[in-house]
Amino acid sequence: MTARPAEPGSAAGVSTAEPVIVAALGEIPLGEGRAYAVGDAMVAVFRLRDGSVRAVSAVCPHRGGPLADGQIDRSVVLCPLHLNAFDLTTGCSLSGQPDLTVYPVAVDDQDRVVVSPPVLSPPVPSPVPSPGD
Amino acid sequence: MPQRLVVIGNGMAGARTVEEILARGGDFAITMFGAEPYGNYNRIMLSNVLAGVEDESGIFLNDLSWYADNGITLHTGREITRIDRFAKVVYDADGTATGYDKLIIATGSRAFVPPIPGVHRPGRGYHQGVFAFRTLDDTRGMIRYAREHQRAVVIGGGLLGLEAARGLQNHLPHVTLVHSAGHLMNAQLDEQGGNTLRRSVEALGIEVITGAYTTEILGKHTVTGVRLRDGRTVPCDVVVLAAGIRANAELAQTSGLVTERGIVVDDQMRALDEPDIYAVGECVQHRGETYGLVAPLWDQARVLAGHLTGADPHAAYHGSRVATKLKVAGVDVAAMGLREPERDDDETLVFAEPARGVYKRVIVRDGRLVGATLVGDVRKVAFLMQAFDRGLPLPEDRVELMFDLGAPSAEVSAAELSDDAQVCNCNGVTKAVIRDTVQAGCKTVTGVMDATRAGKGCGTCKGLVAQIVEWAAGGEVEEDPAASWYVPGVPMPKPELMRAIREHELTSVSQVFATLAPGGEEDARSKMGLASLLKMMWGARYVDERDARFINDRVHANIQRDGTFSVVPQMKGGVTTPAQLKRIAEVAERHQVPMVKLTGGQRIDLLGVPKEKLPTLWAELDMPSGYAYGKSFRTVKTCVGSDFCRFGVGDSTALGIAIEERYQGIEGPAKMKLAVTGCPRNCAEAYVKDLGVVAVEGGRWEIYVGGAAGAHVRKGDLLATVDSPAEVITLTGRFLQYYRENANWLERTYAFVPRVGIERIRAVVVDDADGLADDLDAAMDASVAAYRDPWKERAEPVTPGQFRTSLPLTVLPQVPVREETRP
Ligand code: SRM
Ligand SMILES: Cc1cc2nc3c(=O)[nH]c(=O)nc-3n(C[C@H](O)[C@H](O)[C@H](O)COP(=O)(O)OP(=O)(O)OC[C@H]3O[C@@H](n4cnc5c(N)ncnc54)[C@H](O)[C@@H]3O)c2cc1C
Ligand code: SF4
Ligand code: FES
């Protein structure tokens, strides 16, 4: 993977066509998430307690909650607003919401977090209005 | 090309019929029209919504995505006004035409509005303050209006009227039930049964007037009362009509179908002489009968689906025998068949125990059950219902129809039921379906309920569902283990969990998962509860892993709908100073805080603050956190008390401040909100707080616990009456500590106190019957000593990017900025 050198955390404006260094690993506390701009997209990057990283779209498809503020475990993130759950690896909603976009993410040899463009962006699902809302 | 199936009416019968058709693989292009603007919901549950025991969102049976997923075109909020039987087209109010090959009419019924002067206002529909009780919108309107008014009159003392009256008590203080017949539920109960019921209803605080015709609704602009035929007037500001229902058959009638009291159908649910038009539900009349309950429409839906899809060419509906049950907590009524014996040789058994509110009557003819009434004790209802429905032979010893004699009743009655007996009338689930689910491996009651939807309607059958699961599992029923766990990810109830944590000396959340969770797996849903518990148990030894905290506790503020936060500084006892107000005003102005609001907790909320600005605001305010975000001690509301109030008998303000000073920020299983009030007029609402203190004459103080006035309303129980503020402070700490140690995660005191029982709590906390008082006091002292204002955590972030924005570049739904607060 060819990581373009960039100021950690200041990646706005970089084309999404190539991997982007978003942060030094140490900027993301263990078990938490932080949000970064990758091109025009906003990506929530999580550092799991087993040391691995995950990256998904930062905005909850339910009602726009900030997913980087959510709580995680080794498989899911819970949105802080209404606790909808999403699988961190597949982006799939576990509670009937549209799915998240997953971004390939890795830690390079200098302990920097590198986010790549999504392999296949799923069609943007139009949220189904629920009468219970 | 599949045939076009059009369904008029998207209520319980219409949607159920479509479900049954889909279940049989019916190949139709389905279009549904519903006059209401929603998917299909469980109308029965409106009573529970009104009573506040069920959330609106919990009553939907088919939400909009269900229609989309099944390829059904649904038009909500569209009323069909005409059917052209010859051209096979239906028209809605705008004149839009939709063609069909097969048509199902499922228009249900509506509230019967008796012709009482004053019900309507010319040109305005119902008089303001007059409501029917049929739809979700009716219910919402009624709740909204009732909350702002004082006295309701419910016209009609049948099932619906009783449920309306009970539900309204949840929203206003005075409810009167006006019923025209001589006794309540006269369609189902005989006089003695009705009178027994009346006493139980009156005991709930509902006033009952029987034999009373309402002749007028009084009041020009708003309702002021109702007048009865005997000249009496009953003052009120809300009127609810529950005087019966009428089938919605006008559409069919004006379109040329045969209608009487409903749309006349044959045994295949076909409208008379119409090869392609069918009707189901409350809008139909079958063999001279119309129905007002759901059980018959499940039968009708099955028959119609079997017939239409061809899955069951012999499908025929022969009518239903229905049982009525009242859904009013604490007042059990069930009735079926005859109310009173009709023939000389009908056998009847009557059992009455008026003091306990119990009345039972069973009527047997030719060895078959033809009628039963149960008031106050409905344990035998499942068995009676089945005997009635199927005409089963009855026990020799007729008294067994009323009581379980010695035998292990649960097993017997579950086994007695036949396979196709319908157990859940709301969702139409039979005993066989429950048995099969259990045999397929699901051996917990909650699991079976989730899988079959049994018991998820009005809930009256939950007991029976549990019995059947028990029977079907042959004694191997599994407790739904998770129900008793403290958090979902660690399979232990709280006491066991606490023992294990102590034994293994687990001081961090990750250690708890590693040691006690299955496979050592972390669980995001469990982190917050574990963090709270460990902090309470270990105090300073607790290893605080920040990822175990919910976002609110990471940044000491409450997250809002647009991802910004609110800042609520501490304002002990609701008392502030001009200097403090000025400082708050300046900070709010400088940072253009979108809204400044007085909270229900007697302090000031600065709303709409971005995360990255929190530390700056705290520094400039230089006030401690009010903890308006945590599962923790929140506020102590006070009234002015003896310092200024002419009625005050105790210095409630000083005591409130002292309590807040001492217990500020203490974490717990849920929020703890307190109040101190200077006399029993209770201006600080102490009777409805987790712990409320009321000053009484003679320098004494009453302490109430377990009160609530949020999602749940409950008056607190009197824990003790003491002589001094110092004793109040000690008992407050001891009670809170007992609660912290023993309550389940997120269990507020309003649930905890009744669960444990006030006597038991008093024994431990006040009388020290278990010798625990010193330990409780010491544990609380340690927590108090460990208090540190979290808003001091501002010079340096505790974790990297603690206050970094998580807001996306794309704009979230913004919280509106109000005109008057715009800078
Ligand atoms: C700000 C305030 C409304 C106001 O403008 O007055 C408020 C705001 C919220 N309340 Fe409340 N409650 C506020 C007073 C109350 C009161 C009245 C009181 O405290 O005297 C009650 C009834 C008392 C009670 O708690 O029983 C109250 C009962 C609730 C409940 C229902 C709790 C229950 O179990 O009955 C919730 C929901 C919950 O806890 O799950 C809730 C939840 C909320 C939350 C935290 C919703 C949430 O989870 O985000 C709201 C946060 C809004 C925000 O964005 O900051 N709020 N809430 C009040 C803050 C009081 C304070 O100064 O601390
Ligand atoms: C508060 C309450 C409590 C109840 N409790 C119980 C109980 O405990 N047990 C029990 O068995 N039953 C109970 N019932 C009765 C039960 O709800 C009904 O039997 C059931 O809803 C009937 O179903 P349905 O589909 O025939 O009619 P509905 O559920 O009323 O559905 C008919 C639908 O058709 C729509 N519609 C009507 N005309 C048109 C048109 N021209 N074009 C388009 N759409 C149209 C209506 O808007 C409505 O949505 C209760 C009813 C109420 C109101
Ligand atoms: S009542 Fe409380 S929870 Fe509901 S909207 Fe108002 S502040 Fe929010
Ligand atoms: S916004 Fe994410 S769950 Fe509602």
Image: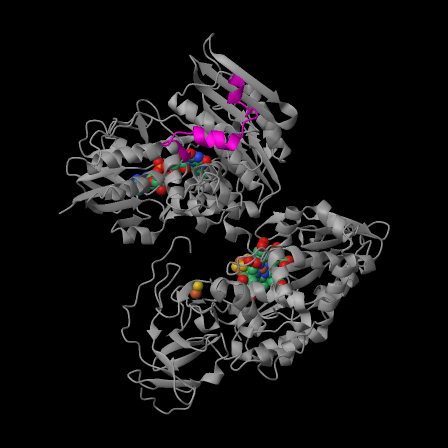
Q: Position of residue B411 (x, y in %)?
A: 49, 32
In magenta stretch: residue B414: yes
Any part of residue B521 in sight? no
Any part of residue B36 in sight? yes
Question: Residue B627 appears in which quarter of the rendering?
Answer: bottom right
Q: Position of residue B422 (x, y in %)?
A: 39, 33
Residue B809 vs residue A32, the one in the foreground: A32
Question: Residue B280 appears in which quarter of the rendering?
Answer: top left
Q: Is residue B782 left or right of residue A12?
A: right
Query: Is residue A28 shown above or below B138?
Result: below
The residue at 75%/49% (across/down) is B762
Query: Which coloring applies here?
Result: one colour
Query: Is residue B516 shown above or below B246?
Result: below
The residue at 44%/32% (across/down) is B113
Q: Is residue B26 left or right of residue B386?
A: left
Query: Is residue B776 shown above or below B820?
Result: above
**Magenta stretch?**
B398-423
Ligand 3 picture quarter: bottom right
Q: For the view shown, which residue lies furthest in the right direction?
A: B698
Q: How many marks?
A: 0
Residue B280 vs residue B445, the one in the foreground: B445
Q: For the view shown, which residue lies furthest in the top direction?
A: B344
Residue B586 vs residue B710, the one in the foreground: B710
Q: Is residue A61 left or right of residue B347?
A: left
Q: Is residue A127 left or right of residue B347?
A: left
Q: Position of residue B21 (x, y in %)?
A: 25, 41
Q: Position of residue B537 (x, y in %)?
A: 66, 65
In magenta stretch: residue B396: no
Residue B3 vs residue B83, the one in the foreground: B3
Query: Is residue B522 shown above or below B236?
Result: below
